[in-house]
Image (cartoon, rainbow, N blue to C red):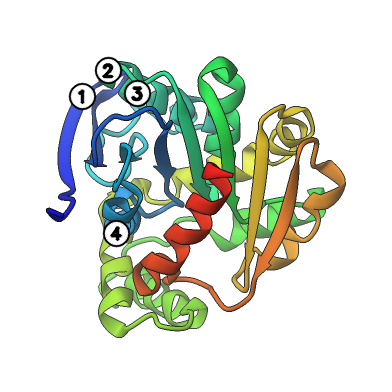
Amino acid sequence: MNPIIVTRHFTDGEFGQLHYRIAGEASAKPAIVCLHMVSKSSRSFQHILPILGQDRLAIAIDYPGYGESSPPFSESQANIENYATAVWQVLIHLGITKVDFVGYHTGCMVSVCAAHQQPQWVNKVINIAAPIFLPSEVQTFCDMFAPIPLDEQGNRFRIMWERIIHHRGPGMTLEMCADSMAENLRAGDAYEWGHMAAFNHASQYIEDIKTLSHRLLVMNLDDDMREQSERVDRYLNNGLRKDYFQWAAGFLDAFPEDVAAELLSFFDA
């Protein structure tokens, strides 16, 4: 069997061009659409897309302002609703009307929001984590992820690297850490807009989970969202939480075959 190749493409969006990666070919199965955390990009899924695309389309999309997608015109336009709208702009461009979503951290919010925007086109949803923030936590996280000013000492970059190393999971090599660092830098001074979008969306995500009619799997990793994810059970309308404490940050690069097997098992059940 010929290897599945990941190709990269652009289409027009509300703020300029939207960038996406695609693998596989259209089939009777829903396309799997992968949505990244911030401040990363569709590159997070580069190793898993060819595995997911063996018998269907697999797509990973950069939100406006991340990866190679054009940024919003202002920070107020960097919100979860606009990220979800951008996802549908790509899928409509491709003529795709049946999808399974995989959202990772911020992508959890984007995937569930997108499912509410076009419910008739969505089959199932996987959230890698469930960012259930308490009201008392939101300001703490906003302060933690406030943009770090540039200075000649390079404090922004030092702190970025220290955080990546701190959250480094099993199997995550230093080369993978360096790739993660590079993704942080692509958004320039707007690199934290997506985190603020997520924190502003915290209460709406809970409401969206509670009213989601689609089957939902929450994959709870041993990462910095473990505590928040363990709060999701009471809000699940048609889903379940499953723990994967053998995995943490970097798991998509380190264990793509094992992760793909879990995703496909849920989607194909």
**Callouts 1 and 2 close, C-beta under 8 Å:** yes
- Disc with the residue nearer the chain's start (4 vs 1): 1
The residue wearing badge 3 is: 91
153 sits left or right of 259 in the view: left
Label 4, residues with CA under 10 Å away: few <14, some 14-19, many ≥20 = some
221 sits left or right of 178 in the view: right
**Callouts 3 and 1 close, C-beta under 8 Å:** no
Q: For the residues carrying marks 3 and 4, which lies nearer the camera in this image? A: 3
Q: For the residues carrying marks 4 and 1, which lies nearer the camera in this image? A: 1
* Quarter of the N terminus within the rendering: bottom left
**Label 1: element kind:** strand
**Label 2: element kind:** helix
**Callouts 3 and 2 close, C-beta under 8 Å:** yes
Point out residue 157 in the picture as x, y percentages from the top left corner: 33, 72
Rounded to the nearest whole Å, what is the CA distance between mark 1 and mark 2? 7 Å
The residue wearing badge 4 is: 183
The residue wearing badge 1 is: 11
228 sits left or right of 177 in the view: right
Which residue reaches farthest left? 2
The residue wearing badge 2 is: 93
Q: For the residues carrying marks 4 and 2, which lies nearer the camera in this image? A: 2
